[in-house]
Amino acid sequence: NGGDAAIASVMVSELQNTFPDSELMIVTSEDVRGDQKFEGVRQIKSLFFFAIYAKKQIFFRIFRSLYMLFVTILWCVIYRAINIRLNYLLTTNLKEVLVAYATNDLVILKGGGYINGKNDVNSAVTLVLNLHEILLLLILGKRIVLYSQSIGPFGNSFQRYLVKRILNKVDLIFAREGETVEVLKEIEVTCPRVVKTADAAFLFKSNKKEEMKKYLKVIGVDFDKKIVGIT
């Protein structure tokens, strides 16, 4: 959606400015095709995409998800322990994601509000799949930053336990509001650093400012007064 795209745009811009010689890659749950790029950065489909969206039939989704959870953890454990890639266990797409994870220096999880849950099966499955990718990176020994996050609430003690176990092992969490900081304290997440910050979308630079002004004037916004935007 537009908000996610704005945050991703900010991340790409800031990383390119901070690390001008770095090579970036976006792992996305969108159905990207071929060499489709986002602001010049290569994109590949995430493990989450293959678990949730790749098959329409519920039976195939369940089977594919369970197989993916098991085989990707095994791949990462063996690779970390003896530097052998069990690529024959993986589809081409899964292999592409794991090789990308194994060969990177830093992984930054895009800002948003996807680490949460309700007290139902669908929420539990979604949460497990989101945490699963972080777990793989931890097994591989990668540096992990959670960027501009809204975390919580959670539907039950099991979900809170999973989040606590995983997030306490990441390197840095940027919380985009005080409520997230309080949720992390409540579930005893005390990873090396939890930093309260603003929503990354505020750094977004639109090239359509004048068009936006024209539209706002049409709907009656008075630019002679102070303007406050609420989302």
Image (spheres, rainbow, N blue to C red):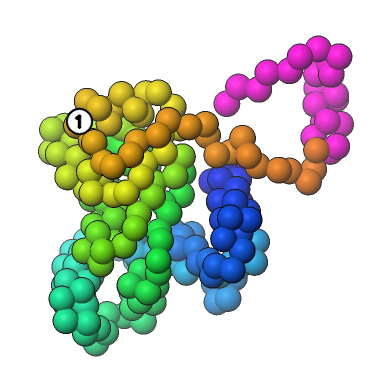
Residue closer to the observer: 176 or 227 = 176
Q: Is residue 49 visible?
A: no
Q: Quadrant of the C terminus?
A: top right
Residue stretch in magenta: 210-231
- Residue 68: name its quadrant: bottom left
Decide: few, some or many residues near mark 1? Use Cα within 10 Å; few <14, some 14-19, many ≥20: some
- Residue 218: name its quadrant: top right
- Write the residue at 27% across / 80% down: 90
Q: Judge whether residue 162 is colored magenta.
A: no
Residue 177, image x, y percentages? 44, 27
157 with respect to 5 (left or right)? left
- Write the residue at 14% across / 39% down: 161
- Write the residue at 48% across / 32% down: 197
138 with respect to 103 (left or right)? left
Residue closer to the observer: 57 or 40 = 40
Residue 142, image x, y percentages? 31, 62
- Residue 39: name its quadrant: bottom right
> Which residue matches tag 1?
187
